[in-house]
């Protein structure tokens, strides 16, 4: 059984051919070794010059600073990793069955947990005996434990999948988790509503939650364009920027100019819809010329538009204040009541003691409501003819046109809708930060939003939530990984590696789960009974 | 007139660099129908490898001209080989497993790869721009005129001559490779119909790999030229250069190699003349707007064939 299985698992990674049928005894170790050697060579070619020789300029002129230790370590990790993958996955020895893999997975998880616990408890007194031997030793334990834990989970899942595949049933894990799927949304919503009042939740957590919700809202907005209508938009951040700058300029310059101080407390609530409308207009303006383009051309042109808008923001000094940005953007008020520490403030009006956290919590609920509105509107739109038309367009544009759907206006509405929600999120961003500058609207931002939508599963609302929490949470985790600092060379900063991790995640998700984390979709139309369908039946992003 | 001539030379130089990058886009698009979003970053990697190789060899402007040229050829060879290794790996890791996946999957994976390459170089080499003294100086004076404001000299610098000659030589070599050799035949057949090509015994995977390697080698040449001409690089140059080169590929007609070169020249000239006569700040806007205009009004490009959509 086992020797013929790895052939299918190969997925084209290895140059190594599966053992042919005449020798079912085991893998061809010669080929495995040759492949590993080639891997090492290529890794050396790639890592060697760029990592090993740093062109730095300590005293003006460029000189090379050599770092061969890092190169050797990285190449060794890659080579050994590939070799282990050969042995465990692609070219397993004959006696290893998926059951073994599962058992090893459990073993690795156990080892990982024990190592993490040992590492954490021995960092300081009274159990600090490991730290006494060498101060970075506990950190090494934690790092090793995390690695063992992750690879254990991976082994377990892949082993379980293989067992299930061999039996022709869904894996045990998927079967156990499936009934809970329905409640994930409800539980998350409940948690989101009570979050600020859970004991132990401080400002940092609420701030993080606000950030996550902003990205969830952006993800939901982009999901209309990419997930529902199937138009790949790489310049989504342009609408975010339009929203933010509209809010910033209207609230700091034009509203005081037009209306004086009379409307100041209400600025946020008056400008918010305007900013959304302006962003939607920009969606129409930018969408109009690009709509005859096919998927990947559309992607590049939207990217170009995103960059054009950013360049204009940087260079139109008299209007946007250029790279310096706009500061002093008014904070939102509680429907006219400001969050200040005086008699007219929010706290005094409602008989509470003043705390700065009140404003943050209010902001939290504002973005929560805005995000939920985005979700609600999207869900309802899917049931309207226009939403059906979006999805039909995604499935097959030619069929759509021959059925009499006006593809131009359908695409335009999707674009404008997505842009509008991007604009709302942008206004919120502006009012939360109190400061906007072109720095915040670079292509990387578009890439992060797209990564969230893609990781979650194009077209899945709950997937976007999970992915946003994972991505933004992971960013935070990178900041927290202090134990890595202890074992890495001096000057190591985990936050530097955030975007690298996003890029790697995008590639890996496309390779192993191209349909995203959530692979079930709610059908927009059904006969008799509503049943989630697998995404394999849903076309995605034909453009 | 002198000013115009000078800008014309600058435009052709810049256009040659864009053209070399554009060939990589156009070949990959022609053969597997995807935008290799990471190609601009391969150009950037090529520039960085050139810089590192120059430093490792210890090349300075004080070397004699013949030695300098020999050393630069060595640097070029190193950059081409290593950039090829990069692009080969990118194709192997991020694109090949996705062949036959849904349409946007390779593009998203390519965006991921582009981020990975940029961040890899940023982390390994630092985010600051890397400036270097020009290695090659000198040139030919084309025109010399005294005006009341002072002397106005139109020069064709040695670097510009080298860039234009190298590009021309590579173009000739490349066209010969595509039209005369069995490798080129294999590539063209894969372009027409991958399944049929594999049925008549062409190793499609190998052909695609070689296409990526060739594209990367040309991008590495462009990287070295860019570095020699402008003397400063950073990890972000690949993004802008990539989008502009892609514009060039589309303008010339995607899939057409002479088209890519022509498109590169046009984009280079537009950018240089826009900066010279209108505004430097908005030169990128001009290039991007050009991309939109071309795609909307001339989607098949200057030398491309119109695409027929089949059901």
Image (tube, rainbow, N blue to C red):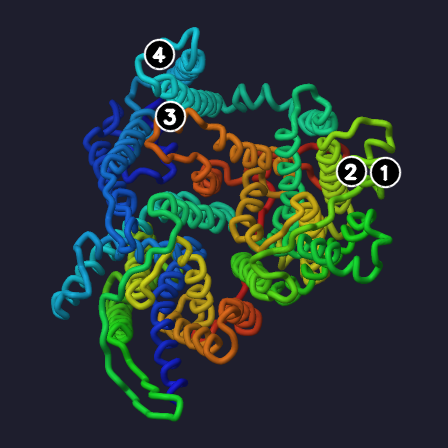
Specify few, some or many for label 3: CA neighbours under 10 Å numbering under 14, 14-19, or 20 or more: some
Report if the CB atoms under discs 3 and 4 are less than 8 Å apart: no
Residue designated by label 3: A486
Quarter of the image for residue B62 reads bottom left
Report if the CB atoms under discs 4 and 2 are less than 8 Å apart: no
State left or right for residue A73 relative to residue A349.
Answer: left
Q: Mark 2: which secondary structure?
A: loop
Give me the chain letter of mark 2.
A
Specify few, some or many for label 1: CA neighbours under 10 Å numbering under 14, 14-19, or 20 or more: few
- Mark pair 3, 2: CA separation: 42 Å
Specify few, some or many for label 4: CA neighbours under 10 Å numbering under 14, 14-19, or 20 or more: some
Q: Is residue A454 above or below residue A293?
A: above
Give me the chain letter of mark 3.
A
Q: Mark 4: which secondary structure?
A: helix
Quarter of the image for residue A382 reads top right
Residue designated by label 2: A339
**Is residue B78 in view?**
yes
Q: Mark 3: which secondary structure?
A: helix
Specify few, some or many for label 2: CA neighbours under 10 Å numbering under 14, 14-19, or 20 or more: many
Residue designated by label 4: A130
- Mark pair 4, 2: CA separation: 50 Å
Seen from this angle, which residue lies furthest front?
A342
Residue designated by label 1: A344
């Amino acid at each position: 059984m086992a020797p013929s299985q790895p052939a299918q698992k190969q997925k084209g990674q290895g140059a190594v051919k599966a053992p042919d049928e005449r020798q079912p005894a085991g893998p061809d170790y010669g080929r495995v070794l040759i492949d590993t050697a080639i891997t090492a060579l290529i890794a050396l070619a790639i890592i060697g010059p760029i990592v090993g020789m740093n062109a730095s300029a300590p005293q003006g002129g460029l000189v090379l600073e050599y770092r061969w230790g890092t190169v050797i370590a990285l190449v060794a990790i890659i080579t050994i990793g590939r070799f282990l993958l050969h042995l465990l996955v692609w070219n397993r020895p004959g006696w290893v069955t998926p059951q073994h893999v599962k058992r090893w997975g459990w073993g690795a998880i156990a080892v990982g947990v024990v190592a993490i616990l040992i590492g954490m408890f021995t960092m300081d007194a009274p159990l600090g005996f490991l730290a006494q031997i060498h101060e970075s030793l506990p950190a090494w334990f934690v790092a090793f434990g995390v690695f063992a834990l992750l690879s254990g989970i991976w082994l377990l899942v892949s082993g379980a999948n293989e067992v299930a595949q061999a039996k022709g049933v869904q894996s045990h894990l998927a079967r156990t988790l499936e009934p809970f799927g329905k409640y994930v949304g409800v539980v998350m919503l409940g948690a989101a509503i009570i979050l600020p009042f859970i004991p132990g939740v401080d400002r940092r957590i609420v701030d993080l939650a606000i950030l996550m919700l902003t990205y969830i809202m952006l993800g939901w907005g982009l999901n209309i364009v990419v997930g529902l209508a199937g138009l790949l938009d790489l310049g989504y951040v342009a609408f975010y920027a339009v929203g933010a700058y509209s809010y910033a300029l209207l609230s700091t310059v034009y509203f005081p100019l037009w209306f004086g101080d009379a409307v100041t407390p209400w600025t946020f609530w008056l400008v918010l819809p305007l900013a959304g409308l302006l962003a939607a207009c920009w969606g129409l303006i930018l969408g109009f010329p690009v709509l005859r383009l096919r998927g990947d051309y559309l992607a590049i042109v939207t990217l170009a538009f995103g960059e054009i808008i950013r360049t204009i923001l940087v260079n139109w000094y008299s209007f946007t204040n250029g790279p310096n940005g706009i500061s002093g953007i008014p904070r939102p008020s509680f429907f006219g009541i400001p969050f200040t520490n005086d008699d007219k403030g929010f706290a005094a009006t409602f008989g509470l003691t003043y705390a700065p956290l009140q404003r943050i919590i209010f902001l939290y609920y504002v973005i929560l409501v805005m995000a939920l509105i985005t979700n609600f509107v999207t869900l309802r739109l899917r049931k309207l003819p226009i939403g059906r038309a979006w999805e039909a367009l995604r499935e097959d544009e030619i069929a759509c046109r021959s059925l009499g759907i006006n593809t131009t206006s359908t695409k335009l509405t999707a674009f404008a809708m997505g842009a509008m929600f991007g604009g709302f999120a942008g206004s919120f961003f502006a009012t939360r930060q109190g400061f906007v500058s072109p720095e915040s609207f670079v292509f990387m931002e578009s890439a992060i939003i797209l990564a969230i939508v893609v990781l979650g599963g194009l077209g899945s609302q709950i997937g976007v939530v999970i992915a946003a929490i994972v991505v933004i949470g992971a960013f935070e985790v990178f900041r927290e990984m202090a134990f890595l600092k202890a074992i890495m060379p001096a000057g190591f900063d985990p936050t530097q590696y955030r975007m690298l991790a996003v890029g790697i995640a995008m590639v890996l998700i496309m390779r192993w789960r191209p349909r995203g984390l959530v692979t079930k979709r709610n059908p927009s139309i059904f006969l008799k009974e509503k049943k989630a369908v697998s995404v394999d039946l849903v076309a995605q992003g034909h453009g | 007139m002198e000013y115009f001539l000078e800008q014309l030379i600058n435009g052709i130089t810049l256009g040659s660099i864009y053209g070399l990058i554009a060939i990589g886009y156009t070949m990959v698009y022609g053969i597997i129908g995807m935008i290799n979003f990471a190609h601009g970053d391969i150009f950037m990697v090529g520039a960085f490898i050139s810089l590192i190789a120059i430093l490792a060899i210890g090349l300075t402007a004080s070397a004699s001209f013949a030695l300098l040229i020999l050393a630069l050829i060595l640097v070029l060879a190193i950059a081409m080989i290593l950039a090829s290794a990069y692009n080969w790996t990118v194709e192997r890791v991020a694109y090949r497993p996705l062949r036959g996946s849904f349409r946007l999957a390779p593009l998203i994976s390519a965006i991921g790869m582009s981020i990975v390459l940029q961040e890899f170089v940023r982390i390994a080499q630092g985010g600051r721009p890397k400036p270097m003294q020009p290695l090659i100086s000198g040139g030919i004076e084309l025109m010399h005129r005294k005006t009341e404001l002072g002397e106005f000299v139109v020069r064709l610098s040695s670097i510009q001559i080298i860039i234009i000659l190298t590009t021309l030589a590579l173009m000739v070599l490349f066209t010969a490779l595509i039209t005369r050799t069995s490798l080129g035949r294999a590539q063209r057949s894969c372009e027409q119909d991958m399944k049929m090509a594999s049925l008549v015994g062409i190793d499609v995977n190998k052909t695609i790999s070689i296409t990526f390697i060739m594209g990367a080698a040309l991008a590495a040449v462009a990287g070295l030229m860019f570095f020699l001409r402008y003397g400063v690089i950073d990890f972000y140059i690949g993004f802008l250069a990539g989008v502009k080169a892609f514009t060039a590929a589309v303008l010339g007609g995607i899939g057409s190699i002479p088209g890519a070169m022509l498109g590169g020249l046009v984009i280079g000239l537009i950018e240089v003349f826009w900066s010279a006569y209108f505004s430097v700040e908005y030169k990128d806007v001009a290039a991007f707007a050009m991309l939109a205009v071309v795609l909307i009004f001339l989607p098949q490009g200057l030398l491309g064939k119109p695409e027929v959509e089949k059901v």
